[in-house]
Amino acid sequence: MEFRADAVALARSSGRPVAQVAKELGVNHETLRTWVRKTEEAERPGAAAKDAPSWRNRWRGSAPARAARVAGDARLAGRIRGVHAASGGVYGSPRVHAELREAGTMVNRKRVERVMREHGIVGRHQRRRYRTTVPARAAAVPDLLRRDFSIGRADERWCGDATYLPVAGRWMFLATVIDIGTRRVMGYSMAEHMRGGRDTPVDHHPGPPGGLYHVRQRETP
């Protein structure tokens, strides 16, 4: 109700078209016109006789302050959209609030939350996390590499691993084989699952001839 009253006050006091004010506030212009019309009807003599005159006088007297608050929220919403867009649509209200304060905009965190909620600005929620390395059922294999990933000669030590990436709104699993000595990618494969198969880089690159191929143990789902 507070937002509605402030929006009406801004539309009536700004001197600008209702459609323009509605666009700035992020509401439908017909909805704002209806709010304005109902407010004007309620202010007509005899339309709200049951309302105390003192309440009406206070509400009318606070119209400039409400209009200023709505205008300030509209400006803040523009800054929030800029921060939100720069983050790729990821930031929610806590991070947006921190970025605004760092940029010199001193604003209350709850106000940022309210403005984002009223204008439909939503951060990207953290999606499900996957475990790409889990204890294997087979017997443990000695770590011959001894966690030594320093650069050395080519085709002496290879390393295989897997991770997951968000691609076009879904998770894709990426498996790679890298030459530790040169940091060169020997092969890679992407799929929507973590199951092994003929198309994995391990099948195409069984290991360096006479060298060491290091892969973290994992279960196959």
Image (cartoon, helix red, strand yellow):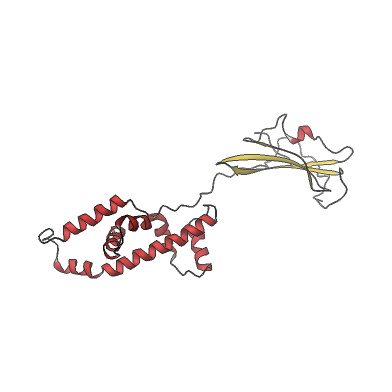
> Which quadrant of the figure contains the N terminus?
bottom left
Q: Nearer the viewer, residue 113 or 167?
A: 167
Residue 119 x/y as whole percent: 40, 55
For this rendering, which residue is in front, 176 or 136? Answer: 176
> Which residue corresponds to the image point at 67% horizontal and 37% vertical from the top-left?
190
Q: Quick one: which residue is furthest to the top in this view?
A: 198
Up/down of 163 relative to 110, above or below: above
Position of 221 with respect to 149 (left or right) is left
Going by the picture, which residue comes out furthest to the right?
210
Q: Nearer the viewer, residue 213 or 143?
A: 213
Number of numbered callouts drawn: 0
59 shown above or below 198: below
Q: Who's the residue at 70% across and 35% down the image?
A: 137
Residue 31's x, y, as percent?
Answer: 28, 51
Is 2 positioned to the left or the right of 190 in the image? left
Query: Residue 221 appears at what percent x and percent y?
Result: 64, 33
Could you tell whether 68 is left or right of 79 in the image?
A: left
Picture quadrant of residue 113: bottom left
Foreground: 144 or 32? 32
Q: Position of residue 173 (x, y in %)?
A: 65, 39
- The residue sitting at 87% across, 45% down in the picture is 154
